[in-house]
Amino acid sequence: MAIHEQYEPKSTRTGDVDMKLEVIVIPVSDVDRAKSFYTGLGWRLDADVSGKDGFRVVQVTPPGSPCSVIFGANVTTAAPGSAQGLHLIVSDIEMAHAALAARGAEMSGVFHDAGGVFHHKGADQRLPGPHPSRSSYGSFASFSDPDGNGWLFQEVTSRLPGRIDAQRAAFTSASDLASALRRAADAHGEHEKREGGKHDDNWPDWYADYLIKEQAGAKLPT
């Protein structure tokens, strides 16, 4: 075999190419109604651009999200309301539930799945309340937009191993960081109890270690 046939250019190797999901397209029947709904939830309006023959693109972004949402006129052939299972990851399911309910979203109650892992389709095997042990990935709440496109909150506090590079851990919003600091404070309080109630002067280092390891899915300090 010729040398040039054996060589695979680096640019064609899938594993070497970053593929960042930054936009999803959802189908709506009334663009202005959808725009009012999503901006009413507090989502940032990035663009509202019109073109020829009724073409229109609206882009909004949920708070703290690296991925935006696009809807409009003549942007998709999908039936309005057919987008389902769109997940919004939050660090505190009850706080997120209350925030959107206050903005007028018709929320389901907070729930977990009977199997204790990912939720089933629709409302199958839903049990009321957050996951009994409040385990990461296990608590949900759902809502829909005016067309019926379905969204879910999923509470994630500690990532599975390998999901986050510990050297690149970051927080996407002040509220996300605040929630993580509260969890670190609670855990550090338990740490001080185990140490006989003695004040830990190195608590900043302990907090930092906890926050990084929680995001990376590593074993947490005790």
Image (cartoon, helix red, strand yellow):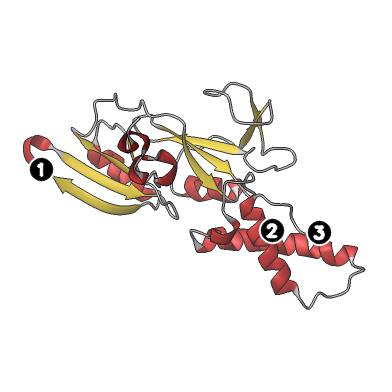
Residue 104 can be seen in this image: no
Residue 56 position, x and y percent, is 17, 41
Q: Residue 183 shows which numbered tag? A: 2
The residue identified by callout 1 is: 51
Instruction: Name above or below for residue 14 compared with residue 167.
Output: above
Residue furthest to the bottom in view is 201
The answer to whether residue 26 is above or below residue 68 is: above
Does the image show residue 193? yes
Ranked by sequence position, the earlier of labels 2 and 1 is: 1
Identity of the amino acid at label 3? Thr
Dot 1 or dot 3: first in sequence order is: 1
Q: Mark 1, mark 3: which one is toward the viewer?
A: 3
Q: To which quarter of the image does residue 146 belong?
A: top left
Quadrant occupied by the C terminus: bottom right
Residue furthest to the left: 52
Which quarter of the image is occupied by the N terminus? top left
Q: Which mark is residue 21?
A: none
* Numbered badge on residue 222: 3
Q: Which is in the foreground here, disc 2 or disc 3? A: 3
Label 3 element class:
loop
Labels 1 and 3 touching (C-beta < 8 A): no
Quick one: label 3, few (<14), some, or many (20+) residues within 10 Å?
Answer: few
Q: Residue at x 11, y 36 (%)?
A: 54
Residue at 48% over, 38% down: 87
Q: Amino acid at mark 1?
A: Gly
* Label 2 to label 1: alpha-carbon separation: 48 Å
Q: Earlier in the sequence, mark 2 or mark 3?
A: 2
Q: Quadrant of residue 111?
A: top right
